[in-house]
């Protein structure tokens, strides 16, 4: 009987080891984390504001009031502080499976905060070499929701007074812009000339941009800030939502999609 048990135990152990080896072979030798897909994993553009916004909730870890970006049709999160704290402003956020692994695999990210509980997700902030602030979000089970609209994210635009590498000049608006496609987090820097004809929110605020088939169709219900014009790689128009966010709609020319 003892011999029988030993034989059976050996067979079971061999089977278990074989199954484990097969599973390991399928997984491969510690498969690397896939590179971030900024278009597919985009979550929101976060902007600080001094105004109270409908539906705010309080994040105790940072003592900041935030709106529900998952309900916003253009994925904008408004942040408001009761005190002097301003935090990373503005920022672009992406959904990841694991913050630490995603940050390790990412290029050129400097930690700004340790991961903390933000209610719907575990989050952490980082900064790129060119100064953009990136938030990585690890959602808790059941907290991630589908976007309120089917618009395809293209980039966020940030205003700067500093010259940036690879700037090109857009004559129609007298602004220097960086190459969206070459930025790993789809950030466009805009540096306006003093005599730019652009005034108001487009000149002063960050914006979130989406690729559309028809600007006229996608812009319905939005306030016009800049009528559609030729921006080189695309025909673009700038608009404002009811809550004050600036949205760029882009009709890319053929073979120009980045």
Image (cartoon, rainbow, N blue to C red):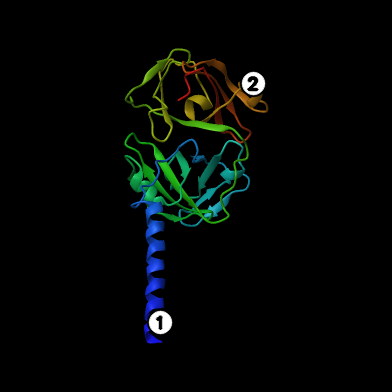
Q: Is residue 250 above or below residue 139?
A: above
Please give the name of the residue rendered at 62% of the width and 43% of the height, measured from the top-left corner. Answer: 71
Whether residue 247 sits left or right of residue 181 in the image: it is: right
Residue 162, compared with residue 8, is above or below; it is above
For marks 2 and 1, give the CA distance.
77 Å
Which residue occupies the foreground of this view, 14 or 247? 14
Asked whether 31 or 192 is in front, the reply is 31
Residue 128 falls in image quadrant: top left
**In the rendered view, does 242 fall on the left or right side of 103?**
right
Q: For the view shown, which residue lies furthest in the top direction?
A: 171
Q: Kindly identify the residue that appears in the image at 57 percent across and 43 percent down.
A: 69
Where does residue 120 sit, x and y in percent of width and height? Answer: 54, 54
Picture quadrant where residue 221 is located: top right
Percent position (x, y) of residue 53? 60, 43
Locate residue 146, reporting x and y percent. Answer: 60, 44
- Classed neighbour count for the residue bearing mark 2: other residues with Cα under 10 Å, few (<14), some (14–19), many (≥20): few
Marker disc for residue 117:
none
Q: Secondary structure at mark 1?
A: helix
Callout 2: helix, strand or loop? helix
Of the numbered discs in the image, which one, if any, rests on residue 216?
2
Quadrant in which the C terminus is drawn: top left
Residue 182 in sight here: yes
| Quadrant location of the N terminus in the rendered image | bottom left
Q: Is residue 217 above or below residue 171?
A: below
Tags 2 and 1 touching, CB below 8 Å: no
Residue that label 1 marks: 5
The one of 249 and 193 positioned closer to us in this rendering? 249
Residue at image location 37% in from the left, 74% down from the top: 10
Percent across and percent down for residue 39 are 49, 35
């Amino acid at each position: 009987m003892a011999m029988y048990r030993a034989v059976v135990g050996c067979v079971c152990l061999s089977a278990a080891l074989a199954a484990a080896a097969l599973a390991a072979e399928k997984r491969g030798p510690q498969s690397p984390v896939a590179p971030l897909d900024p278009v597919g994993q985009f979550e929101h553009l976060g902007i600080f504001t001094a105004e109270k916004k409908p539906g705010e909730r309080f994040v105790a870890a940072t003592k900041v009031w935030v709106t529900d970006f998952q309900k916003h049709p253009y994925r904008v999160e408004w942040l408001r502080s009761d005190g002097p704290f301003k935090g990373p402003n503005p920022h672009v956020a992406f959904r990841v499976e694991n913050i630490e692994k995603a940050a390790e695999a990412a290029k050129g990210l400097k930690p700004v905060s340790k991961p903390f509980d933000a209610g719907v997700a575990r989050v952490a902030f980082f900064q790129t070499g060119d100064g953009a602030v990136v938030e990585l979000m690890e959602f808790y089970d059941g907290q991630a929701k589908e976007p309120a609209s089917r618009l395809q994210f293209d980039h966020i635009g940030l205003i700067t007074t500093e010259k940036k590498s690879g700037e090109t000049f857009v004559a129609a608006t007298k602004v220097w812009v960086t190459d969206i496609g070459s930025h790993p987090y789809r950030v466009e820097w805009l540096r306006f000339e003093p005599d730019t004809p652009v005034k108001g929110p487009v000149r002063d605020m960050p914006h979130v941009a989406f690729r559309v088939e028809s600007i006229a169709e996608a812009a319905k219900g939005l306030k016009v800030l800049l009528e559609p014009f030729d921006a080189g790689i695309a025909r673009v128009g700038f608009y404002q939502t009811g809550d004050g966010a600036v949205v760029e709609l882009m009709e890319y020319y053929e073979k120009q999609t980045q």
